[in-house]
Image (cartoon, rainbow, N blue to C red):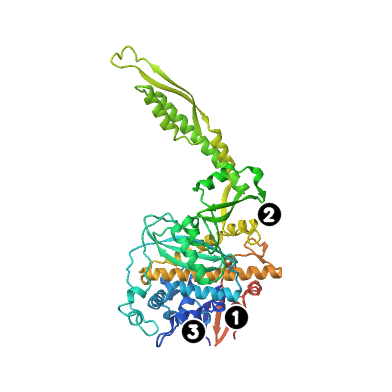
Amino acid sequence: MFSAKDLELKKIDHLGIVAGIVDSIGIVEIINNFLGSEPGEKVSAGQVVKAMILNGLSMMSQPLYMFPKIFESIACEHLIGAGVKAEYLNDDKLGRILDKLFIKGLDTVFLGISLNAVKIYQISLSSSHLDSTSFHVDGEYEYSLPEVIFNNQKPSDYLGKENEEEKSPQAIKLTYGYSRDHRPDLKQFITELVCSGDGDIPIYIKSVSGNEVDSKRFGEIAVEYQKRIQVDSLIVADSALYTESNIKLMSSMKWLTRVPLTIKLAKSLVRSLAESEFVKSEKTGYSYAQKKINYGDIEQRWLVIQSQERKKSDLKKFSKEIEKALINTQTKLRKLAQEKFACVADAKKELSKISKAFKYHQIKNIEIIEKIPDIKEEKQSKYYQISATVSENKDVIDQKILSAGRFIIATNVLSNKELSNEKMLSEYKAQQSCERGFSFLKNPLFLADSIFLKSPERIEALAVIMGLCLLVYTLAQREIRAALKSLNYTVKNQLGKAINNPTMRWIFQCFQSVHLVTFQQKTEFYNLTSEMKYILLFLPEACRNYYRYIS
């Protein structure tokens, strides 16, 4: 007779895919090499990081402070390692590993893993995309790193008391700054991310204090990244990168960035170029005009881009803007017409003052009329009033219409053969890779309000764990898409339509309710469908290994 104790049911779901990608790039081994081991430990540092990645990509709405609880229902030993139990993954252990990561050097650890992924999966770094975003935090944080054991030593032991401050990593400041989350009331930190142009894979991640400014940091982070990867990569970024100091700093590197229209030369160019100067792009809805420019003593190519879709949108907004401006102008002029001035000079001065604020209109048919007060008001002297009409400022409006839908991208790669105009446009459009990465990272579950994260050092370390989650996710997505396209196969999306570019989120959803069943010391998979087995064919071997029958 059998009892419930003879049967064990543990969830696998899509986590076998996650674990397989982690294994394929050697995250556990790399972390263990960096952090070493502690005497008598039941779970290694690498296994803890693997568990955090599994949690981060669990899609089960379980924040990190629920860590031991989340693994009670999951096949821990199967996914993480033999002998690993849920209770070993407690707040204390996680916190100690985050501290160790911080002390070792977070960017060094992350880069060691990402460059190993680049090598294994042959990811091209011919172009790299740089961007940043802010993450807000709640509560108060203590700026003190606990005395953790690191390679059998405390920080003070291996740093040396006299050099500890100099050599020990400095924590970021959680402080107020420009908030991308529209939460200026909360403290924040900034995360800078560099992704490969090939597959949106995060290669470099770095957190800085919450009041840092992109225009100051971007040049420095680009140079630092290039130095660390030792690959001649085209650095692509938004307009925050384009300052005189930054492009001089990057003079020995290749870069591509948007030019801010606050620069007079740029503003003049988008407003003055005739339609006849634009060449139709291979990319539908785009055209461009190339110009050779010297800015900041750097020779460069500017590509004035015109987007038809954006032009329609800009003109629609502009039409409403003009209509609103006309109403505002007419209202101000009516009020002005009712005012009484002591002399002509005062009337002209006030008229000149308000006309300077008119953006798209101008005042015409101006008359300053002398008026005699009513006989009942004998003490009042004569006064003056203004009569005028409003008309559109055609020159300004025509320039605005001409510039609609236009923006400028620039590069210091002067050879069209090395970087064609078409490639410039496609690389800049691919800048959305970082934005997609940040959208993924901004899942609030990553920044759970838990005790073991109550320090800037651990918050900064957690940002790297978030980056590793993104690395695993994008690698899996890159691989399945590449396999489907190369073999000319498809999978079905949510609507049942055959596609060859599924999101990994959808693939994860396809693996819901897969369990590992153990009965009488025999283990089998439950609910692993033929559709799931088909999907696994397009993923790396390491992923398939977690879904094979192991009886």
Q: Amino acid at mark 1?
A: Asn
* Residue that appears at 32% across and 11% down: 375
Q: Amino acid at mark 2?
A: Glu
- In the foreground, 509 or 105: 105
Residue 223 screen position, x and y as percent = 49, 65
* Residue that appears at 55% across and 35% down: 395
Please, what secondary structure does the residue beneath circle 1 have?
helix
Q: Is residue 75 left or right of residue 336?
A: right
Mark 3 and mark 1: span between their CA atoms? 27 Å
Q: Which residue is mark 1?
A: 545
Of all residues, the one furthest to the front in this rendering is 297
Q: Which mark is residue 5?
A: 3
First in residue order: circle 2 vs circle 1:
2
Mark 2 and mark 3: span between their CA atoms? 65 Å
Q: Amino acid at mark 3?
A: Lys
Q: Which residue is mark 2?
A: 282
Circle 3 packing at 10 Å, graded few (<14), some (14-19), many (20+), is few
Asked where in the image residue 345 lies, by quadrant, the reply is top left
Please, what secondary structure does the residue beneath circle 3 have?
helix
Q: Nearer the viewer, mark 2 or mark 1?
A: 2
Mark 2 and mark 1: span between their CA atoms? 43 Å
